[in-house]
Image (cartoon, helix red, strand yellow):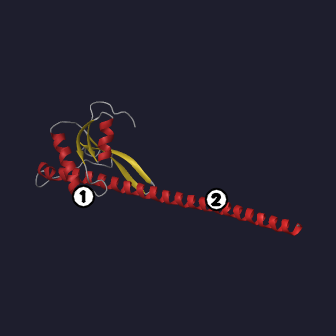
Amino acid sequence: MSEIEGDVVIITSGRRARDFFTRRGYNVISSHLGFSDKPSYNDAVAIATDAAERFGDMQFDELHIVFTLFKTALSQIPTSDIILPVEPPEKETGATKKSVEYLFLPEAEEILKVLAPRYLETIVYAALVQSAASELGARMTAMSSATDNAGKLVKNLELSYNKARQALITRELSEICGGAEALKQQ
């Protein structure tokens, strides 16, 4: 993990994340617990509201969301995105693209007051769901690997047991044959 520079405050989701950053001396200002494997939209609303209020109170000037992006059961990608402040997409410059003014009814500010919190909640919910899927995929892979390894171990133990049993039978047969030969020579 690379060192984080500057004054960083952290809002965590989950006990392990909280414990990880607390043990390393980071300033964990808020923790949300108890829903890591089955996050609901209400959990995302609680986290998003907490983060938005703290951003509004200027406890920090940039909000990054860090989560595990699920690709496959074998592949999860650590991901970090800046979600606050919301930056407009960069405009392409050139002869083919023109800047267009849009008319909003009601006013753009009123629309943003409603949409901005929903946007933040949706981003947080998507990150929670991606992380939960990644965790379950990793667990599934680990259990599959453990099952495969146990199967190999059982095969090796059966082979060792059969070799030992075969050696015992061979030794007993040798002793019986040796005893029978000894009786014939008497």
The residue most toward the right is 185
Q: Residue 31, percent across and down?
A: 24, 44
Q: Residue 10 lies in what quarter of the image?
A: top left
Q: Is residue 108 left or right of residue 67?
A: left
Quadrant where the C terminus sits is bottom right
11, 158: nearer the viewer: 158
Residue at numbered disc 2: 160
120, 165: nearer the viewer: 165
Going by the numbered disc 1, the residue's amino acid type is Ser
Seen in the picture, residue 23 relative to 83 is either above or below; the reply is above
User: How far, Cα to Cα, is label 2 from label 1?
Assistant: 51 Å
The residue most toward the top is 6
Q: Residue 57, percent across and down?
A: 15, 38
What residue sits 20% from the left and 44% below the top?
51
Residue 85 can be seen, yes or no = no
Quadrant where the N terminus sits is top left
What residue sits 56% from the left and 58% below the top?
153
Residue at numbered disc 1: 40
Going by the numbered disc 2, the residue's amino acid type is Ser
Badge number at residue 60: none
Count of numbered badges drawn on the protein: 2
Q: Residue 136 lies in what quarter of the image?
A: bottom left
Seen in the picture, residue 54 relative to 171 is either above or below; the reply is above
